Image (cartoon, rainbow, N blue to C red):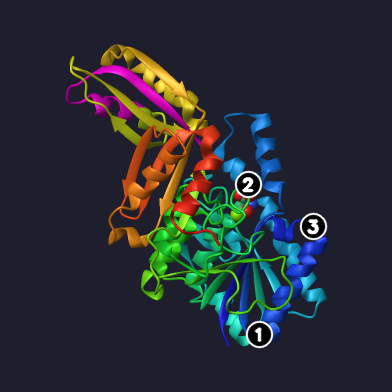
Amino acid sequence: MARIVMKFGGTSVGDLDRIHNVAQRVKREVEAGNQVAVVVSAMSGVTNQLVKYCTELSPLHDAREYDAVVATGEQVTSGLLAICLQENGIDARSWQGWQIPIRTDTAHGKARIQEIDGSELIRRMTEQNQVAVVAGFQGLAPDNRITTLGRGGSDTSAVALAAALKADRCDIYTDVDGVYTTDPRIVPRARKLDKISYEEMLELASVGAKVLQTRSVELAMNEHVRVRVLSSFKDGLANDTEGTLVVDEDEIVEKQNVSGIAYSRDEAKITVRRVPDRPGIAASIFGALAEQNANVDMIVQNISADGTTDMTFTVGKADLPRARTALAGVKEQIGYAELLEDPDVAKVSVVGVGMRSHAGVANTMFRALADKAINIQVISTSEIKVSVLIAAEYTELAVRALHTAYGLDG
Ligand code: ASP
Ligand code: MG
């Protein structure tokens, strides 16, 4: 017997037929003798629609009311799945975030989970074999208002619940059958990984592989929750080799230099030309950006001879207007020459824990890109990641070349 949290994303509960399939899947786990709690997303497209309603009524709407609106998608699917399970002879009960409760901070629209009291759910699952169907994405602020956890937040709900229930595993059912070495739509020979470490998954999630919400991976790593990503569109009881397990690095025997390649076209490049090269300038530029909540990622500064320098960095594309305003606001004070913007860029990243102990990983990347005559505009690295910024039109070419260069083609 195992205790499992099963999470189903928007496409997996996208219509009544699919909800029916999900119920069958849950039923099989229960009949196999497992204790099960389920976390559901809203039906696919629903959250987008709800967000749109809010912004259409008021672009600067009250974040508390936004949460009251967007949390409803998950309320619907949790109730529907509970009905469907009951219909199939399984004792099931829906739970909203506030009913458990899943306590969060007050950061409406991107709240963080602080505490989950799992005792009642544990009692029901052990004494009655009852299945809890929990609405993902939502929680309760200290002032008793509904909060939501940020887009994709149901993953985080599931991992947090798994930790609170001391579950043996958290199975995340989605529309792909696992984590791949890269996006199979770009590289058909991409391979599914059987296992990946939390750290690699964290880096991949944060650089654009949209399988799991970044925060859920962080939480899984801190709480040692074994996460498995697998497809809800396959029939039969999932066996142990299905999907991708996200686990501690120690559990991975063959450490690859590069396990995965991710890309993102969500960033834009900004260059501030000819800023005075003296202490405090970077603080002024990035201070102004932070004040406007513009998220900065890659940064390079060039040295030049005449006492000025160029500062290049990337911000999220959605943050570009705010970054522009922020920099215009400090132009007088800093005294730079001009501002250049380029939204047509892509960030391509290679990730692997083996990088820690192997030299030459970055060089393989630069060589492969050079061979395809792809110009690198900005480079950034972490202990287990190398990212480059290139022209967006070369994204596919770069990803394919790198996939081959690191021997990942299946
Ligand atoms: N329904 C929410 C969203 O679309 C949360 C989730 O699906 O994880 O972002
Ligand atoms: Mg998702």
Task: Classify mark 3 as within 8 Å of ligand 1 or not, answering yes or no.
Answer: no
Q: Which residue is mark 1?
A: 128
Q: Earlier in the sequence, mark 2 or mark 1?
A: 2
Return the mark for residue 15.
Answer: 3
Mark 3: secondary structure: loop
Q: What residue appears at the point 32 percent right and 30 percent down from the top-left corner?
A: 286
Q: Earlier in the sequence, mark 2 or mark 3?
A: 3
Residue 289 in view in this figure: yes
Nearer to us: label 3 or label 1: 3
Q: Is residue 181 above or below residue 45?
A: below
Q: What residue appears at the point 41 percent right and 72 percent down from the top-left corner?
A: 252
Nearer to us: label 2 or label 3: 3
Q: Is residue 122 above or below residue 9?
A: below
Q: Position of residue 300 (x, y in %)?
A: 30, 32
Q: Position of residue 384 (x, y in %)?
A: 34, 55
Q: Which residue is mark 2?
A: 68
